[in-house]
Image (cartoon, grey):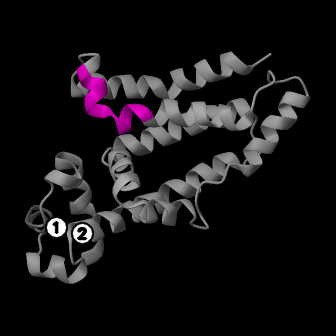
């Protein structure tokens, strides 16, 4: 394993436990089994490290999502696969959605840099497919972009506002994780039942 891989793995562990604001470079260095000087040599500060970890994770997620969007599957199967794939990914990387929300406010240029990335998730094929399935009477008439927004909102929100969700509905970390496992299928079922003829 390279030093960079050790740092990324260690950073993921620490960011997951402490979040971006609570994580310390010394903790990440200790977790990686390297000294802090080496960590600072590779990444000058915590924000640069987090962005590198984020882009590394994003580069793993985006191809999975595009494979689903561009496949020959039906819209219904794509919805099922997307909710399962996205929630599984974020459960392994729960620190990412809050960071994106924070960066949208503090550093919108960074957020736009990955949203404009050539390999970003691109729903163009899926939107065209939704329009065709509406025309063929498979799906009820709906704005495809509103449909995608519903799917994204239902999958992203619990992770982006995790502390608020846990507090409002009074659930533990274990209960939250169980609910997210259930949402892999329940979101898809709700969306599909609302749009199928």
Left or right of 100 on screen, residue 25: left
What is the span of residues highlighted in magenta in the rendered image?
Answer: 157-167
> Is label 1 in a helix, a strand or a loop?
helix
Q: Quadrant of residue 116?
A: bottom right
Task: Give yes or no for contact between labels 2 and 1 (Cβ–Cβ under 8 Å).
Answer: yes
The single residue placed furthest to the bottom in the displayed view is 41
Return the x and y of residue 123 as percentages of the image width and height.
Answer: 68, 48
Is residue 175 positioned above or below 121 on the image? above
Which quarter of the rendered picture does the N terminus lie within?
bottom left
Q: Which mark is residue 32?
A: 1
Q: Which residue is mark 2?
A: 6
Return the x and y of residue 165 as percentages of the image width and height.
Answer: 31, 25
Name the residue located 63 percent from the left edge and 53 percent from the top edge: 66
Q: Is residue 130 magenta?
A: no
Is residue 3 positioned above or below 18 on the image? below
Left or right of 179 on screen, residue 145: right
């Amino acid at each position: 394993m390279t030093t960079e891989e050790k740092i990324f793995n260690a950073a993921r562990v620490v960011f997951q436990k402490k979040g971006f604001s609570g994580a310390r470079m010394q903790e990440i260095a200790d977790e990686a089994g390297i000294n802090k000087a080496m960590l600072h040599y590779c990444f000058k500060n915590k924000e640069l490290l987090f962005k590198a970890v984020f882009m590394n994770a994003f580069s793993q997620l985006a191809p999975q999502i595009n494979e689903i969007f561009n496949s020959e599957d039906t819209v219904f199967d794509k919805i099922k696969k997307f909710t399962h794939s996205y929630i599984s990914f974020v459960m392994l990387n729960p620190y990412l959605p809050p960071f994106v929300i924070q960066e949208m406010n503090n550093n919108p240029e960074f957020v736009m840099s990955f949203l404009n990335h050539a390999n970003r998730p691109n729903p163009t094929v899926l939107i065209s497919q939704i329009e065709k399935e509406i025309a063929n009477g498979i799906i009820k008439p709906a704005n495809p972009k509103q449909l995608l927004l519903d799917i994204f909102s239902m999958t992203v929100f619990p992770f982006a506002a995790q502390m608020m969700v846990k507090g409002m509905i009074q659930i533990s970390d274990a209960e939250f994780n169980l609910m997210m496992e259930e949402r892999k299928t329940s979101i898809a079922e709700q969306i599909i039942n609302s749009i199928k003829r």
